[in-house]
Structures are given as structure tokens and as C-alpha cells.
Amino acid sequence: MTAASATPAHDPRSRFVVPVLAFCGVVVAVMQTLVVPLLPHIPALTGSTPAAAGWLVTITLLTGAVFTPVLGRVGDMYGKRRVLLASLGVLTAGSVLCAATSDIGVLIAGRALQGAALAVIPLGISIIRDELPPARVLPSIALMSSTLGIGAAVGLPVAALVVENFDWHTMFWASAALGLLDLLLVLWIVPESPVRTPGRFDVLGTLGLTAALVGLLLAITQGADWGWTSAPTLGLLAGSLLVALVWGAYELRTASPMVDLRVSARPTVLLTNIAALFIGFAFYANSLVTAQMVQEPKATGYGLGASLVVSGLCMLPGGLSMVALSPVSAKISAKYGPRTALALAASVMAVGYVVRFFTSHSLWLIVAGATVVSAGTAIAYSALPALVMQGVPVGETGAANGLNTLMRSVGQACCSAVVTAVLANVTFEAAGRTAPTLHAYLLIFLIAAGAALAALVATAFLPSRRPGRAEPSAPGTVGASTSVPAAQEGR
């Protein structure tokens, strides 16, 4: 059975599969940044502390990082549409939970559920690969992958508008309604993929991966508050490293691993994931810094004193550029290969930060620099899954793209820690308050440019391959080249 055969060409609904999946991706990405404008107000609104409020962002990072590769693997084994629906259901439930409470503990639990839905994006990429004819795969995957950046850019100004004009619970009710709409659209439009990866689900591998990721990300995200040399931070880092080593040894010996490390060690996959980590870092710096920089008071000498809504709108042109450039990136990948597209993307991001370094005194120049970085991000996020799919068999697309998305999330977590440390330590007194200096922001731009250049270096070492040619399966790797239609799967 061919992948595309599950979606008959004469079915009028088939033309809406990609728009529906892309809409799901945007909604999920919006959830990741939804609370950012609300964070300064959360302690007063919930009677909590700023540290507790910060967990509304941290918890989504943790659950997203853990569930993205896991649900990608589950989708490969038991049905991608089925797992996609479950992820959207979890998103909707988390949104309702947040909308119905002002208790910080319940809010954190709801945000944890919202974060788990990040797996929607790699699942959507996998469905596209399985369902569409080859000519439509690259542009459709480019759009789906870019939704992560599009949603982040759109989410900030929308959330800011809601916070300034409505009760703050409104944005969670709205996200619940969007999640329910996504569910209905997927049920109506998206077919179940016929491709399955045979084998048993790796429970121990899942637990090991979860423990290693939680330890690592907790240390990264909380290290600034706990102290980078404190016992909890060092203990978590050492513990996560030890668990990762034991987990890796187990995964190499099990018949149906959670993560096929032999496939992941192929140069195409390994270097693409390394590049994804640096791209995630460079992308997130743009999102974190822009809004805060333009909101800084004019008394700082560089701040523009912009409102919450204006600062959010600064990212909107970048989001629109990502929509416009996703098909361009697909054409570059199709003609010259995704390796070339990723190299171009990393170069554009580095140039964008150089522009930002020299143009940080004018609103429109700040927006222009941020948009250039977003343009590079759009090309990168479109090229990354295409590179991953060159190196993995069809039956492992969900897990492999989930792992690649995970690497972007780890890059974002590292970026958040670095940005927090720089802005908290390179400060001066302005208008009776402590504020980051202009040099703090410029230093972040240089670090982010360095991350983009590191991604370029990783890309340069990727094996050269003609567009559309897949890397051969590793011999002796279980499931490396085996996938079966759902109707033939032994269950």
C-alpha cells in the first residue's frame, strides 16, 4: 500500500489535510507563549510568588520535551491520527483547567497538559509524509514545521491584547475552543495513516528518557535561581548524565527501542539534531529579547517605553514572513537539497543578529532585525524535518521528528537560561530601578549569532546528497526499514 493511497485524490477533503494540520500546529505553538505577557501579573492574580509563576513556562517546556519524542514513537506504532487526537484532547483539557481556576497549582497542572501537546507538530509532519504524493511533501512539511515559529510570533500580541482588554481567563477559554475546533477538524478531514512500525512499546526506555530529560532541563531552567554550582543543579546534571548513559546502553540492546540510537547516530540525523539545538537557541533569543527590549523605560537611554501590545506586535512581521517563506524554503530544498537550505537559514539568522547589534535604537530597525532572524528561522524549520527524513525509514518518521523537535526545545531551554543570566547580571541603575544595560542585549545578540554560526558549521559537515535520495537503512537495525500497513499489522 502506498502512503498516498489512504487519501483518495477524488476525496474533496484531501485538499484540506495540510491546512488543518498546520492550523493545529499554530494553535499548539500559540499555547507555548500564551502566558508570557501575563507572567508579571500572575503573583498578584493568584496570590503566588514570581518563582511559582515562572513554572507556568517551565512546566510546558518539560512536558513538551518529554512527550514529543514519546508520542512520536507511539504514533509510529499505533496510529499517528489517533495520537494526534489524544494530544489535542490533552491540550483542550489543559486549557479548560487553566480557564476554570486562579489557583497556581492547578494552573501549573493545566499548563503541563498544554505543553504535552507539542507532539502535534512532529505527528503532523509524519502524517504529511505518509499521506501526500511526493510532489506535495516538501512544501507541506515546510509549512507544518514553520508553525512552531508562526504560533510563537502570533501568540505574543494576541495574548497581550487579551491581557490588557479582558479578564485573563478569557485567553484560556479561547484556547480551549480552538483545541476543540482542532479536534473536530482532524476527525472530519485527516485520515489515519496506514504506516505502522511493528514491535512492542519500550516502557523502560521511555522512563529512562523521561528521567534524563527532566533532570537536564530542570538544571538548565532553574540553575540561575538555584546557583549553577549549587548541589541541586550539579546533582541533577550528574544524575541526568548517569541515567542517559544507562539508558543508552539499554536502548542499544533492546529489540524495539524507544529511540533507535543506531539510526540517530547516522551523520545525517546526528548533525541535523545538533544543528536543530543551535537553531532553537538562536530562534528563542529573538522571541525572548525583542519584547522586553522595546518595553524598557526611556530613562535607560536605549529603551522605547513601548506598551505590552506594541512589544508583542514587534514579532508579528516575523510571523508573517515565516508563512510567506515556508514555500520558498521548500523550493530551495527541492532544487538544491535541504542541506543547502539549512546552511542559508543559519547564515541569514547570523546576519539578522549582526543587524540587530548595530540597530537597537529605533523601533522599526528593531522590528526589521527581528524579522530577518525570523526569516532565517522559517527556512531552517522547514529544512530540518526534510533532512531528518533523508536519514530515517518511513516507519520511524514520527519518533525521529519528535527527537528533532526535542533538540530545538533543549536549545530554547539553554537560551532561556543564558538570556536570564545575562540580563540579571549585566545591569545598571536607571530611573530608580535596576535594569539590563544595552551591552547586555548586545551580548545576547552576539551569543545568538554564534549559535547560528555553530548550526552552520554542523550543516557544513552533513553528508552531501541529491534532493530526494534517502540514506540507506542501517543493517541489523530493528525496524530500520520495516513498516507495515495498519490492516496487515499483527495485533
Image: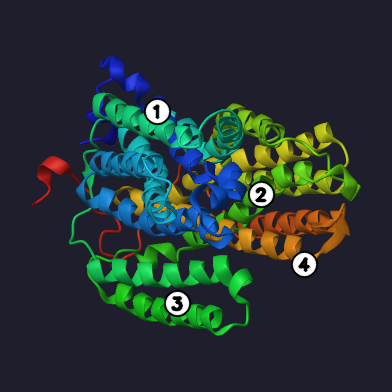
Mark 1 and mark 4: span between their CA atoms? 45 Å
Q: Which residue is labeled 3 in the image?
A: 240
Q: Tell me the SS state at disc 4.
A: helix
Q: Residue furthest left?
A: 491
Q: Separation of disc 2 and disc 3 at Cα? A: 27 Å
Q: Which mark is residue 425?
A: 4
Q: Give the amino acid type for the residue marked by disc 2 in the picture.
A: Leu
Q: Which residue is mark 1?
A: 18
Residue situated in front as seen by the camera: 99 or 323: 99
Foreground disc of the pair 2, 3: 2
Question: Along the polypeptide, which appears first: circle 2 or circle 4?
Answer: 2
As drawn, the label of residue 318 is: none
Q: Counting residues from the N terminus, which is met first, the one under dot 1 or under dot 3? A: 1
Query: Disc 1 marks which amino acid?
Result: Val
Q: CA distance from mark 1 to mark 2?
A: 29 Å
**Disc 3 residue type (three-letter):** Ser
Q: Nearer the observer, disc 4 or disc 3? A: 4
Label 3: how many Cα within 10 Å (few below 14, some 14–19, many 20+):
many
**Residues under numbered marks 1 and 2 in contact, where contact means CB atoms less than 8 Å apart:** no
- Which mark sits nearer the N-terminus, 1 or 4? 1
Q: Where in the figure is residue 95, as x and y percent of width and height?
A: 38, 40
Q: What's the residue type where badge 4 is placed?
A: Asn
Label 2 sits on residue: 288
Q: Is residue 12 left or right of residue 236?
A: left
